[in-house]
Amino acid sequence: MGLSATRKGVAPEIYEAADRRVLGMPGPVWTMAIWLAASAGVIGISLLFPTPADDVALRVAAMLYGFGVVVALLLMRGRTPMIFIHVQLVMYIFLLLRISDMAGSPEGAVTSAMNLIVLAVYLGWWIPRVASIIYIASANLGLLIVFGRSDWLPDLLISWLAIAGLSVGLVLAFGALVWNMKVQLVTDPLTVLLNRQGLGALIERRSHAVSDHVPRALIALDLDHFKIINDRDGHLAGDRTLAEFGAALSKELRPQDIAFRVGGDEFVVILPNTTTADADAVAQRLRKAIKIDWSYGVTEWLPEEDFGTASVRADMALYADKAERERNSP
């Protein structure tokens, strides 16, 4: 249901509001730090019990590299570029394949290859679907080549098929699950518009990027006599009214406009690249198209001011419009 909120001018970045920051680090950063620290720790423990077939130098290099990346992530925190994350994913796959190739037994090779499952979970959770599929497909192809270089391929083929199927399935399943969770977090389930958290995410991620020369406008909207509908016909009737209004608003807005339900029967529309005169024209067109009674207020959102200041002006214009409509209505 929430997926339809992506249809009206909403970039996927809005849904990143679901990411939880830890110590100032976004999700892809702090989870990679924990993952690589754990992997490096496991390698360190394995060095205490080496086997004759182990490449100790390679394991030491992998351990030191892992801890080094963790330190770098902790230092960069929120400033970590995504290109750095992608470089680490490539290096992780390379080291995983190399360690699997150097394993002294089929069991050791399979044990090393099982780390693809952890990689698949990370990819599905944080990396866009196409890139995730490319990563996991490349890793599994490389693993097949590694297994094919040994005399163990007949014994390892079933294991490879199991690892490949599970890792690809995890990427797809986690990707769909996480995306749906993020959409639901910033989407109002009743109107299928973005909610207050989606509004906060949009303001945080885009307000600093607005050019001084690009006009933008706000429309504050409020249903008329909504309390009467709830009291007279019940809350289910009120919910139907809100759902109908949200659907009509989403249908009639321009592709670049973004609508939010900010609470109760209150809505906000952000109109980029729009003057107040054009925004008022949009509101008038909406009033003709949407047969539910509602009032609105329009204001310019100046580049140097925060959303709250502009929102107060839009609300004042809304109250003036509502008072005038009440005076002129039976």
Image (tube, rainbow, N blue to C red):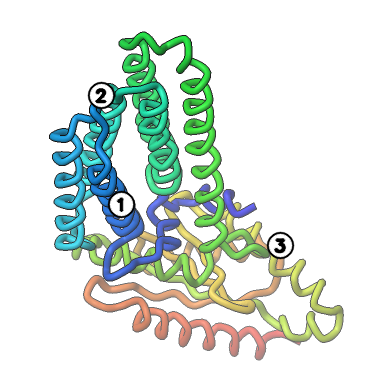
Q: CA distance from mark 1 to mark 3?
A: 43 Å
Query: Left or right: where does residue 9 sit relative to residue 296?
Result: left
* 207 up-or-down from 132: above or below: below
* 255 up-or-down from 148: above or below: below
* 124 up-or-down from 249: above or below: above
Q: To which residue does mark 2 refer?
A: 102
Q: CA distance from mark 1 to mark 2?
A: 25 Å
**Can you tell which mark lies on residue 244?**
3
Q: Amino acid at mark 2?
A: Met
**Can you tell which mark lies on residue 32?**
1
Of residues 243 and 97, the one nearer the viewer is 97
| Residue positioned 36% across, 11% down in the render | 148
**Residues at circles 2 and 3 in contact by the CB criterion of under 8 Å:** no
- Depth check, mark 1 against mark 2: the one in front is 2
Q: Secondary structure at mark 1?
A: helix
Query: Left or right: where does residue 179 sit relative to residue 326?
Result: left
